[in-house]
Image (cartoon, rainbow, N blue to C red):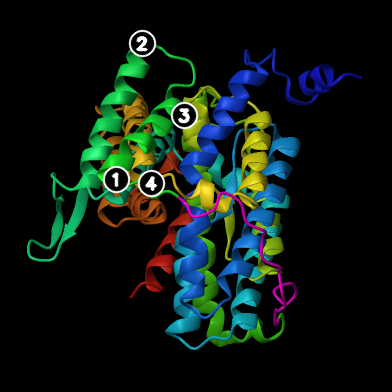
Amino acid sequence: MTMKSWLEKQFQLSAYKTTVKTELLAGVTTFVTMAYVLATVPNLLGNAGMEKHGVMTAMVLLIIGTTCAMALYTNRPFALAPGLGSVGIVASMISNEGVSQPIAAGVIFWSGVLFMVISFLGLREAVVRVIPVSLKQAVSAGIGLFIALLGAKSCGLIVASEAKNCLTFGSLSSPKVCVCLIGFVILLVLKIRKVPGDMIIAIVLTTLVGIPFGVTSMPEQLFSMPATLGERFLNIDFAGALNFAYIPFLIALFIPDFFSTFGTVLGVGAKAGYLDENGNLPGIDKCFQVDAVATSVGALFGIPSMTTYLESSAGVEAGGKTGLTAVFTSICFALALFAAPLALIIPSAATSPVLIFIGVNMLGGMRKINYEDFTECFPAFLCITFTIFANNIANGICTAIPVYVILKLTTGKGKELSPVLYILTAVCLLYFSTLI
């Protein structure tokens, strides 16, 4: 069997009307928009006392392994990496709460086990199926705005104003913002002209534009050998993590990851055109299973929750339709293990325009929300706005579900509610109790 025929059989390229070239460009685009994890995750965990070079090696190996697993098992263009929210929680557990690294790893592991039980029993898919269509569309739109905000914040276009106690424009004359705006114009021109590989071309050109602005820093060396894992593998306290005192941390890791994962999968799946007429994603159970196993496997290396990444939408926007996109993303990360200095020269100002464009472009699902029914449109509105206002996908979903249930009950439409929604409401309230 030739390589071409194997790729066709494995990834069904013809059925999805895509090509190896398109999938390659999409995979590279996903990698470029995700490349910031090479710096951010090791630095965050390094500040908590972990050896950051070993963290980077473990993280990249996990990204490669879990993303390839997603590609081969689900044939979806979803890439995985440590969730930054989970990384922040774990870093805080260690540095602020005094939790040891082995116990923190154990808490991550058990949250992954909980994921696996729910995923392999089909409960996660059942939960997604009872979520109303209006909220599913709102999740996609909320994620879109969240992605756009991430892009705008990463280049300094939008900043938090302590004086005004709100988000506002940053310095519009700063080099990073100027490079971002130039990059956005480049991207729009390429999009309008329908240039193949428009996103990756825009990122490369914007990176070059950043050189005279001092935004793009040239590396001292192009290649470097990866650090060893050291004692990272199995530095974990399984029994100690089961102490009742660590249950709030377990909940804090589990619930946001649960809702963020299904929100990301649905949002990116909607962008790729995978959803059926009920807003469901065929084969979503397989995506959940990979995501769940990835979390527990990552814990064995002390790496916080491995999760499906929002930046996968960049690859989808670039034309990626199958798991081959994710395979190419994995190959890029494998190369980055040896060419990290080169990968890290891409500034956030070069990827920000892509994230902003993708985010705004994901708002199309809002047209499918029934604005004539207040019990449908108002919870959807809350889901979108609190995803942004509370700066977390899980916060938006956990706000919308209880409100949806309350509105249906008070308007005499309780028969429209699935019993599972009552359970989800209780879970959402439990989640908010951990924030008090």
Q: Earlier in the sequence, mark 2 or mark 4?
A: 2
Q: Which mark is in front, 4 or 1?
A: 4
- Disc 1 residue type? Leu
* Position in image of residue 387 (x %, y %): 33, 50
Q: Earlier in the sequence, mark 3 or mark 2?
A: 2
Q: Earlier in the sequence, mark 3 or mark 4?
A: 3
Is 94 part of what is drawn in magenta? no
Q: Secondary structure at mark 4?
A: loop
Q: Which mark is in front, 1 or 3?
A: 3
Q: Which residue is pictured at 43% across the width and 57% down the height? A: 425
Q: Earlier in the sequence, mark 4 or mark 1?
A: 1
Image position of 69 (left or right of 169): right
- Within 10 Å of disc 1 (Cα), the crowding (few <14, some 14-19, many 20+) is many
Quadrant in which the N terminus appears:
top right
Q: Is residue 176 above or below residue 182?
A: below
Q: Secondary structure at mark 3?
A: helix
Look at mark 4 in the image and give the residue it sits on.
347
Quadrant in which the C terminus appears:
bottom left
Look at mark 1 in the image and give the residue it sits on.
149
- Within 10 Å of disc 2 (Cα), the crowding (few <14, some 14-19, many 20+) is few
| Secondary structure, magenta segment, majority class | loop
Q: Secondary structure at mark 1?
A: helix
Image position of 43 (left or right of 107): left
Look at mark 2 in the image and give the residue it sits on.
193
Q: Which residue is pictured at 70% across the width and 12% down the height? A: 14
Q: Tell me the magenta residue range.
A: 219-237
- Disc 2 residue type? Arg
Look at mark 3 in the image and give the residue it sits on.
200
Image position of 355 (left or right of 116): left
